[in-house]
Image (cartoon, rainbow, N blue to C red):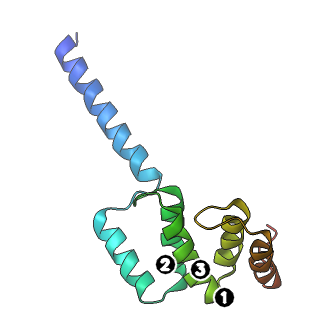
Amino acid sequence: MTSPVRFVSRSALVMAVASMACSTSIGLLPPAGVTDLRARAEAGVPGAQFTLGDMHATGRGVPQDDTQAVYWYRLAADQGLPEAQFTLGVMYAEGRGVSQDTAEAAHWYHLAAAQGYPREP
């Protein structure tokens, strides 16, 4: 028969492991991962800029900050990354991190659409 103490210890261990697995599955990066990503974004890599913008928009791995999200999305969008152009349009349409501006949103949507974004599955 299993002793109650052993059962509680196993349950606590299972809960701790499940908690760690959940936090990893939602994409939290360790501090070194964020540092490396930020270095690539600052070096001008559009994909890294877009990813860092997404992280700021959602608060995953970094503090949630729509103004920072817009900053990084714009850098990637200015380099022609259609995902960033579309997402920047969303930020303007919703007034997140910038003043709501439907004309500016339409501008960024148009640029993304000219590149075929979003693509059909």
Q: Crowding near pointer 3: few (<14 within 10 Å), some, many (20+)?
A: many
Q: Name the residue that disc number 2 marks.
A: 48
Per the rendering, the mark at residue 74 is 3
Quick one: 16 or 70, which is closer to the camera?
Answer: 70
Residue type (three-letter) at the residue carrying disc 1: Gly
Image quadrant in which you'd find residue 4: top left
| Separation of marks 3 and 1 at Cα, in angstroms | 10 Å
Residue type (three-letter) at the residue carrying disc 2: Ala
Question: Residue at image x 36%, y 69%?
Answer: 34
Vertical order, 91 against 107 (above or below): above
In which quadrant is the N terminus drawn? top left
Image quadrant in which you'd find residue 116: bottom right
Residue type (three-letter) at the residue carrying disc 3: Arg
Q: Crowding near pointer 1: few (<14 within 10 Å), some, many (20+)?
A: some
Among numbered discs 1 and 2, the one appearing first in the sequence: 2
Vertical order, 116 against 92 (above or below): below
Vertical order, 19 against 79 (above or below): above
Question: Residue at image x 58%, y 75%?
Answer: 73
| Separation of marks 3 and 2 at Cα, in angstroms | 12 Å
Q: Is the Cβ of the residue at disc 3 closer than 8 Å to that at disc 2?
A: no
Quick one: 70 or 44, which is closer to the camera?
Answer: 70
Task: Report whether residue 118 is seen.
Answer: no
Q: Name the residue that disc number 1 marks.
A: 80
Among numbered discs 3 and 1, the one appearing first in the sequence: 3
Relative image position of residue 8 (x, y in whole percent): 24, 19
- Which tag is nearer the camera, tag 3 or tag 2? 3
Mark 3 lies on a secondary structure that is helix
Per the rendering, the mark at residue 50 is none
Relative image position of residue 57 (x, y in whole percent): 54, 61
Question: Residue at image x 49%, y 86%?
Answer: 45
Among numbered discs 3 and 2, the one appearing first in the sequence: 2
